[in-house]
Structures are given as C-alpha cells and as structure tokens.
Image (tube, helix red, strand yellow):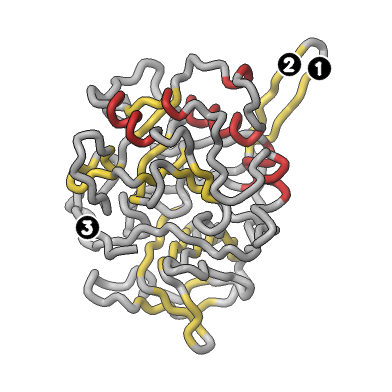
C-alpha cells in the first residue's frame, strides 16, 4: 500500500495515517462477544429470540445510529453507485484482507510499542505499555494489521505493520481509540475511522444480526473531497463518479431481502444491516467494492472458517452476488 495522502478535514487531527487492508491468513484467536440485546420474531405460533451480539462505541456513534427515515440522497448517487457496483459484487474480506481482533485482560502482557514511522508526529502508543496477548498474530502481508480490545481500560489499540521486535513489539503506525467513543479518530484507516468500527464480527454472522453500519473499501475513492464523519482521506481518484471517504451508503430499504432468490444467510444479514444502518466508505482498496469482516479463529488456507461457511461464504473474497449492490444509494449526509 502506498503512503497515505493525509488531507486533514479536522483541525483536531494533526497526524497523517495509513489505511489498513490486510490481515493474517492464518487462524487468529478472536474475542468472545457478549449478547446484550435481543430481537424477538414471531411466526405463526412459534416465537424465536435472537441474541444481538455486543457492539463497540457509544449508542450515538455514527456506526450505531440507524439511517433516518427519509434521508437526503446525494445528487450524484446514481453515477457513484453505478461505478462501485459495476462488478455486481461486494467482496467479503474474510481472510487475507479481514481484520484480526484480540481481547486483552488484566493479566495480558504489556509491552512498550514504538513506531518506526517518525515523521507523522508522536507515536500513538508512546504513553504507556500496551496489552498484547501472547498468541496475537498480525497480518503476514505488508499491512500487518492487528486490533487489541482492552475493555478494562476502555481502549482499542489498532496497529499498522505490527511486528515482534526482540522480546517485544514495534509497529509502523496505528491509533488508540476509546471503546465508548464515536468510532472516529486517529490514523488507522484512510478516513480516520477506528479499525474496529463497522467490521462484521464472527459472532454477528453466527447470530444472523449485524447491529451497526458496515465499512467499505473501493478503488474509486475521491482524492480531495472528504465527507463527515471522516477526518481525512487516502483516496486518489479524480473521476466525476468517485465517492468521498466518509460517505454513507444505504441499500434501498423497500427491498424484501428474504424474497431474493438464492440469498444466503450471511448475505441476508449484510443486506439487512445495509438497509437499517448503511455503510461508510473508509479506505481506498484494489476492488470495485469490498466489505470488512473479522478473521474467524478457524480461518486458514482451507477456507474462512465454519461460521462463515455455514453462512454461505465458502471462500475468501466471496462476492456476495445475491446482495443487490446496484440498489445502493449514497446519502448526502450521514445524519439527515
């Protein structure tokens, strides 16, 4: 990945960041999520209760607030959607480009983590030793992505090009975000979103419920334009149909997802989340459109893991062809 072109849209952000795209294709240990909400559905005489997995960030976070009932649509929405949906696919980044997520406990080892990039400002991890589980494994690819949640401290450490250094750890760059915050801040993604925010979790796929907005990457990200809540961009496109980072996209909510022929359980969960919460474009990527997922603990060369396989995602980069991507719409603003 090329060095991030930091176009800062907020005076509060003084540091350039880098987009994280790749993750370890080998198995990763993921955090156990705790159900805190339930959704009850009644069909005939049978009542089924589905646990809604735990989600990070405040209830008022742009990732956790549903799309308003009648949002204003971007005047250029049709052209932008035609561009990003031209393949008819939204690639599920399940393994190589998935996000490995670890959870720290009070007994997790702590390390001083230094940043090898020194011209972007003070290292975000310089303040105190950071918790990193002994079995943590960053991406083996060039991005070396790794996310560590510390619920006791209420923080999320987000690493770019993390690697072991002697008996400790080092990283090129990253960010520390607040678990109860907005989900925006720092330089761990192109748009300044938390690297954890919007990622489809394994537990959510298992429950069939994604209770938050998703995050997207595209090869047609605007080079200069930034749209709140994004803080910056790593886009490089000057096309008239480019989409600015921070843009919120929503799937047409009038579509009957359950009636789509051949739709898999995983695709249905993604489509419903896109209708209720939408998705934010947060990174420049190599595909027309891709969606971030957590790496499953049993993912590897043989496939993305049993939960994803059972949800109908048989391989990494599964294109989710039964989601009607061409019926997305770009909202004029995330909150109206």
Q: Nearer the viewer, mark 3 or mark 2?
A: 3
Give the CA separation, mark 1 to mark 2: 6 Å
Residue 42 rendering spot, x and y as whole percentages: 73, 16
Q: Quadrant of residue 21?
A: bottom left
Determine the secondary structure under disc 1.
Answer: strand
Residue 20: image tag: none
Give the CA separation, mark 1 to mark 3: 54 Å
**Residue at the image position 40 percent from the left and 33 percent from the top:** 85
Give the CA separation, mark 3 to mark 2: 49 Å
Determine the secondary structure under disc 3.
Answer: loop
Give the residue number, with chain letter if any, for mark 2: 42
Determine the secondary structure under disc 2.
Answer: strand
Q: Nearer the viewer, mark 1 or mark 3?
A: 3
Badge 3 or badge 2: first in the primary sequence = 3
Give the residue number, with chain letter if any, for mark 3: 6
Question: Badge 3 local density, few (<14 within 10 Å), some, or many (20+)?
Answer: many
Question: Badge 2 local density, few (<14 within 10 Å), some, or many (20+)?
Answer: few
Residue 47 rendering spot, x and y as whole percentages: 78, 19
Residue 260 rendering spot, x and y as whole percentages: 60, 20
**Residue at the image position 32 percent from the left and 58 percent from the top:** 186
Q: Is residue 139 above or below residue 212?
A: below
Badge 1 or badge 3: first in the primary sequence = 3
**Which of 180/285 is in front?**
285
Q: Residue furthest front?
A: 87
Left-right relation of 2 to 26 = left
Give the residue number, with chain letter if any, for mark 1: 46
Quadrant where the C terminus sits is top left
Q: Quadrant of residue 46?
A: top right
Residue 195 rendering spot, x and y as whole percentages: 43, 54
């Amino acid at each position: 990945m090329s060095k991030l072109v930091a176009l800062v849209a907020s005076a509060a952000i003084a540091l350039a960041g880098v987009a994280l795209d790749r993750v370890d294709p080998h198995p990763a240990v993921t955090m156990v999520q705790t159900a805190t909400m339930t959704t009850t559905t009644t069909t005939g005489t049978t009542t089924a209760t589905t646990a809604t997995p735990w989600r990070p960030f405040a209830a008022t976070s742009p990732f956790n607030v549903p799309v308003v009932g009648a949002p204003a649509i971007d005047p250029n929405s049709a052209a932008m959607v035609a561009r990003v949906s031209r393949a008819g696919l939204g690639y599920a980044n399940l393994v190589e480009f998935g996000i490995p997520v670890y959870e720290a406990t009070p007994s997790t080892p702590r390390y001083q983590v230094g940043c090898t990039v020194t011209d972007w400002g003070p290292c975000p991890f310089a303040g105190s030793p950071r918790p990193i589980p002994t079995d943590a494994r960053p991406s083996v690819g060039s991005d070396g992505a790794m996310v560590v949640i510390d619920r006791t401290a209420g923080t999320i450490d987000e690493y770019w090009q993390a690697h072991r250094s002697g008996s400790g750890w080092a990283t090129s760059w990253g960010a520390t975000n607040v678990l109860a915050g907005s989900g925006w801040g720092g330089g761990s993604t192109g748009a300044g979103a938390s690297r954890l925010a919007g990622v489809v979790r394994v537990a959510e796929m298992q429950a069939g419920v994604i209770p938050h907005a998703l995050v997207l990457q595209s090869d047609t990200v605007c080079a200069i334009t930034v749209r709140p809540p994004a803080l910056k961009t790593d886009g490089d496109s000057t096309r008239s149909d480019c989409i600015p980072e921070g843009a919120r996209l929503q799937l047409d909510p009038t579509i009957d997802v359950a009636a789509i022929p051949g739709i898999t359980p995983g695709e249905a969960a993604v489509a419903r989340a896109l209708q209720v919460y939408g998705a934010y474009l947060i990174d420049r990527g190599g595909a027309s459109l891709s969606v971030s997922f957590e790496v499953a603990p049993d993912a590897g060369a043989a496939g993305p893991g049993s939960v994803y396989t059972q949800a109908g995602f048989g391989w990494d980069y599964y294109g989710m062809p039964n989601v009607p991507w061409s019926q997305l719409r770009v909202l004029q603003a995330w909150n109206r």
